[in-house]
Protein backbone atom coordinates (compact mmCIF):
# COMPACT_ATOMS: atom_id res chain seq x y z
CA UNK A 1 0.00 0.00 0.00
CA UNK A 2 2.87 2.37 0.81
CA UNK A 3 4.54 1.59 -2.50
CA UNK A 4 1.44 2.54 -4.46
CA UNK A 5 1.06 5.77 -2.52
CA UNK A 6 4.66 6.80 -3.25
CA UNK A 7 4.32 5.83 -6.91
CA UNK A 8 1.07 7.78 -7.31
CA UNK A 9 2.52 10.77 -5.49
CA UNK A 10 5.58 10.88 -7.77
CA UNK A 11 3.38 10.53 -10.87
CA UNK A 12 1.12 13.30 -9.65
CA UNK A 13 4.12 15.59 -9.05
CA UNK A 14 5.49 14.84 -12.52
CA UNK A 15 8.74 13.09 -11.60
CA UNK A 16 10.36 10.85 -14.16
CA UNK A 17 10.03 7.08 -14.12
CA UNK A 18 13.72 6.75 -13.18
CA UNK A 19 12.97 8.19 -9.75
CA UNK A 20 9.98 5.89 -9.48
CA UNK A 21 12.22 2.94 -10.37
CA UNK A 22 14.73 4.00 -7.71
CA UNK A 23 11.96 4.25 -5.12
CA UNK A 24 10.67 0.80 -6.15
CA UNK A 25 14.15 -0.70 -5.81
CA UNK A 26 14.62 0.91 -2.41
CA UNK A 27 11.29 -0.37 -1.09
CA UNK A 28 12.03 -3.86 -2.48
CA UNK A 29 15.40 -3.84 -0.73
CA UNK A 30 13.79 -2.84 2.56
CA UNK A 31 11.23 -5.63 2.31
CA UNK A 32 13.98 -8.16 1.45
CA UNK A 33 15.95 -7.01 4.49
CA UNK A 34 12.87 -7.35 6.67
CA UNK A 35 12.19 -10.82 5.27
CA UNK A 36 15.78 -11.89 6.01
CA UNK A 37 15.50 -10.42 9.50
CA UNK A 38 12.29 -12.36 10.11
CA UNK A 39 13.85 -15.58 8.79
CA UNK A 40 16.86 -15.18 11.06
CA UNK A 41 14.61 -14.47 14.01
CA UNK A 42 12.51 -17.56 13.27
CA UNK A 43 15.66 -19.67 12.95
CA UNK A 44 16.99 -18.39 16.27
CA UNK A 45 13.65 -19.06 17.99
CA UNK A 46 13.54 -22.59 16.57
CA UNK A 47 17.08 -23.32 17.75
CA UNK A 48 16.24 -22.01 21.21
CA UNK A 49 13.12 -24.18 21.43
CA UNK A 50 15.03 -27.27 20.31
CA UNK A 51 17.78 -26.59 22.84
CA UNK A 52 15.20 -26.13 25.59
CA UNK A 53 13.41 -29.36 24.70
CA UNK A 54 16.51 -31.56 24.23
CA UNK A 55 16.90 -32.58 27.91
CA UNK A 56 13.29 -33.81 27.98
CA UNK A 57 13.77 -35.74 24.71
CA UNK A 58 16.94 -37.34 26.07
CA UNK A 59 15.20 -38.40 29.28
CA UNK A 60 12.34 -39.88 27.26
CA UNK A 61 14.74 -41.81 25.02
CA UNK A 62 16.72 -43.08 28.02
CA UNK A 63 13.55 -44.27 29.75
CA UNK A 64 12.45 -46.05 26.56
CA UNK A 65 15.84 -47.74 26.23
CA UNK A 66 15.75 -48.87 29.87
CA UNK A 67 12.27 -50.28 29.35
CA UNK A 68 13.46 -52.20 26.28
CA UNK A 69 16.54 -53.57 28.08
CA UNK A 70 14.57 -55.29 30.82
CA UNK A 71 14.41 -59.03 30.18
CA UNK A 72 11.01 -60.54 29.63
CA UNK A 73 10.03 -62.83 32.49
CA UNK A 74 8.26 -66.02 31.63
CA UNK A 75 6.05 -67.77 34.11
CA UNK A 76 6.21 -71.51 33.74
CA UNK A 77 3.25 -73.33 35.18
CA UNK A 78 3.91 -76.99 35.91
CA UNK A 79 1.67 -79.25 33.88
CA UNK A 80 -0.44 -82.20 35.04
CA UNK A 81 1.85 -84.76 33.50
Image (tube, rainbow, N blue to C red):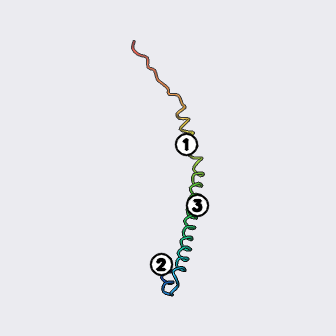
Q: Nearer the viewer, mark 1 or mark 2?
A: 2
Q: Are marks 1 and 2 in contact (CB under 8 Å)?
A: no
Furthest-top residue in view? 81
Of circles 2 and 3, the one toward us is 2
Q: Residue at x 39, y 12 (%)?
A: 81
- Tell me if label 1 and label 3 are in contact, CB under 8 Å: no
Q: Tell me what residue is drawn at x 58 percent, y 61 percent.
A: 40
| Image position of 36 with respect to 72: above or below | below
Q: Quadrant of residue 32?
A: bottom right
Q: Earlier in the sequence, mark 2 or mark 3?
A: 2
- List the residue tagged with mark 3: 40
Q: Disc 1 to disc 3, how far (Cα)?
A: 30 Å
Q: Residues within 10 Å of mark 1 (few under 14, many from 20)?
A: few
Image location (x, y in percent) of residue 48: 60, 55
SS at mark 2 in the image:
helix
Q: Residue 68: image x %, image y %?
A: 52, 33
Q: Is residue 71 above or below residue 79?
A: below
Distance of label 1 from label 2 (alpha carbons): 54 Å
Q: Residues within 10 Å of mark 3 (few under 14, many from 20)?
A: few
- The Cα atoms of the two marked residues, 2 and 3, are separated by 28 Å
23 relative to 72, above or below: below
Of labels 1 and 3, earlier in sequence is 3
Which residue is disc 2 drawn over?
4
The residue where tag 1 is placed is 60
State which mark lies toward you, 1 or 3: 3
* Residue 13, image x, y percentages: 51, 87
Label 1 or label 2, whichever comes before in sequence order = 2
Which residue occupies the foreground of this view, 58 or 21? 21
Is disc 3 placed on a helix, strand or loop? helix
Of all residues, the one furthest to the bottom in this rendering is 13
Amino acid sequence: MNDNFIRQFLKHRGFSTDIQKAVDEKTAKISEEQEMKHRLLAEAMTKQMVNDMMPMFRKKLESQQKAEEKPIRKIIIPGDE
